[in-house]
């Protein structure tokens, strides 16, 4: 009698477990599909900018990098100075890994004529935060093959986690709601910084370059990005933009980047200590970012230098126009 009762209880338990699992899967699918639908309907904000860069951009000039890229290069000045359309695909908090994912996504459609890659030497040192922040690419894992190798760098479990349809949009619902309601973005990815830097400065936060070695995956991503630019006839300009008071840390990384560029048509431009910006508090909003006045002045310097020298590669626009340029 007891055995029959125990067997019945087990059947009820497993039935409830199956129902719970089915309800959970159904909710995950339903809520995840809803979030996904409205995520890709955003018309402004960081997520919209990533969507445009990863899935839509066919611009002639592309800016890649972090918040320094996002704030330092004015698309309208680049367009008028170099000709063609420009999009600033920098994103705050990101590293070269994000930039490389965006680069390969764009290449899958066509090769831009010019890529300006804003570099932060200290980002090339081992730091787990660079990988955590690749969560910004999770919504694109399903449909964009080029981002998948970079998402998998977060952990070996990412493909399993991504079986959940909600997972790519964790922590994003409020942003999704907000940027479905605001006016469409008109800034071509550029986000101007305002105000003037305040002195004295506090010591910089996070000093991974003092205790950690260079990150091989960062260096490999840079090497491949350089190679695909050369293969596709892209004018690549790797640049370190101005910083306050005129110094970027991470000299070992700078040396390694210059070594990687040896034997290619490209050279590293280091504007960290450009005399127009050193200790010029009128042109910076904080230690790492130029304000709008500084960005406009700096972008004009970059345009003038590009125009003053021969293109670093011979451009074959046929590959770009046919959409056949592909990353390795």
Image: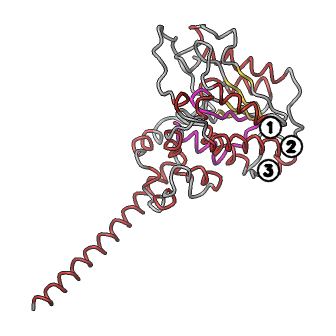
- Residue 317 image label: 2
Taking 2 as reference, is 233 left or right?
right
- Proximity of marks 3 and 2: CB atoms separated by less than 8 Å: no
Quadrant (top left, top right, bottom left, bottom right) of the N terminus: bottom left
Q: Residue 275: where, in percent of width, then height?
A: 69, 9
The residue to which callout 1 is attached is: 113
What residue sits 38% from the left and 66% below the top? 25
Q: Which residue in the structure is indicated by mark 3?
A: 325
The x, y position of residue 309, in whole percent, is 87, 23
The answer for how far apart the CA atoms under marks 3 and 2 are is: 10 Å
Evaluate if marks 2 and 1 touch, with contact meaning CB atoms under 8 Å apart. Answer: yes
Q: Secondary structure at mark 2?
A: helix
Q: Residue at x 49, y 43 (%)?
A: 132
Q: Which residues are magenta?
A: 46-68
Q: Is residue 158 above or below residue 19?
A: above
Mark 1 crowdedness (10 Å alpha carbons): few <14, some 14-19, many ≥20: many
The residue that appears at 84% across and 48% down in the rendered structure is: 319
């Amino acid at each position: 009698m007891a055995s029959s009762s125990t067997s019945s209880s087990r059947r009820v338990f497993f039935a409830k477990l199956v129902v719970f699992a089915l309800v959970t899967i159904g909710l995950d699918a339903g809520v995840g599909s809803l979030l996904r639908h409205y995520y890709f309907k955003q018309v402004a904000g960081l997520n919209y900018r990533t969507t445009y860069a990863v899935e839509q951009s066919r611009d002639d000039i592309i800016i890649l990098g972090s918040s320094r890229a996002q704030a330092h290069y004015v698309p309208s000045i680049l367009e008028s100075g170099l000709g063609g359309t420009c999009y600033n695909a920098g994103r705050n908090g990101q590293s070269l890994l994000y930039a490389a994912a965006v680069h390969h996504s764009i290449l899958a459609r066509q090769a831009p004529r010019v890529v300006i890659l804003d570099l932060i030497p200290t980002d090339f040192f081992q730091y787990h935060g660079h990988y955590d922040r690749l969560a910004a690419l999770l919504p694109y894992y399903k449909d964009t093959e080029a981002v998948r190798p970079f998402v998998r760098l977060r952990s070996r479990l990412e493909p399993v986690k991504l079986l959940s349809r909600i997972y790519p949009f964790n922590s994003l619902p409020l942003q999704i709601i907000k940027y479905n309601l605001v006016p469409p973005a008109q800034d071509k990815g550029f986000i101007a910084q305002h105000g003037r830097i305040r002195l004295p400065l506090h010591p910089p936060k996070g000093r991974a370059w003092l205790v950690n070695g260079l990150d091989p995956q960062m260096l490999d991503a840079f090497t491949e990005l350089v190679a695909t630019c050369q293969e596709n006839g892209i004018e690549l300009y790797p640049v370190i933009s101005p910083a306050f008071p005129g110094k970027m840390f991470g000299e070992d990384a700078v040396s390694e980047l210059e070594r990687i560029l040896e034997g290619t048509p490209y050279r590293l431009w280091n504007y960290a200590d450009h005399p127009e910006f050193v200790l010029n508090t009128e042109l910076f909003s904080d230690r790492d970012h130029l304000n709008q006045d500084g960005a406009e002045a700096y972008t004009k310097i970059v345009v003038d230098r590009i125009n003053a020298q021969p293109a670093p590669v011979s451009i074959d626009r046929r590959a770009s126009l046919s959409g056949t340029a592909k990353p390795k």
